[in-house]
Image: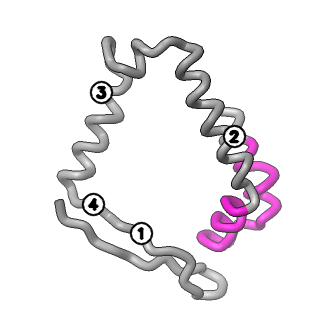
Amino acid sequence: MKIAQEEIFGPSTKTRIAEVLYGDKTDFVADVKAASDAFKLGSEWRRMDASASGLLLNKLASLIERDAVELASLETLDNGKPYKDAYLADLPLSIAV
């Protein structure tokens, strides 16, 4: 596994907002396979009781709601999108899914 690091800078201020790690093609292939396998018949996700998977998805939605201000701020810093759009549109749509 070869990992590369890259600093992320906001497009408007050019200030450093994060550092991300990238894997190589092997990592990518393994991740895509794991995601694909999760939806195959007999997978743990497919065998999971609907109430259990619902609890996991609701937990994710709750975490997005809890951290909405920070997530919207990061989205704004990362791509210059107006904060209002990220906070009032993008995050609620993500939660609704």
Look at 71% across and 48% down and name the residue there.
91
Percent from the top left, x then y, of residue 67? Answer: 70, 54
- CA gap, disc 1 and disc 4: 10 Å
SS at badge 3:
helix
Name the spot of residue 21 as percent of width and height, x first: 36, 67
Kind of residue at disc 4: Gly
- Write down the region rendered in magenta: 70-92
Q: Does the magenta segment cover residue 61? A: no
Circle 2: element type: helix
Q: Which residue is mark 1?
A: 20
Which labelled disc corresponds to residue 23?
4
Badge 1 amino acid: Val
Could you tell me how far apart the alpha carbons at marks 1 and 2 are, in whole angstroms?
Answer: 24 Å
Query: Quick one: label 2, few (<14), some, or many (20+) residues within 10 Å?
Result: few
Q: Which residue is the site of mark 2?
A: 62
Q: Is residue 29 left or right of residue 43?
A: left
In which quadrant is the C terminus drawn?
top right
Label count reads 4
Q: Is residue 74 above or below residue 33?
A: below
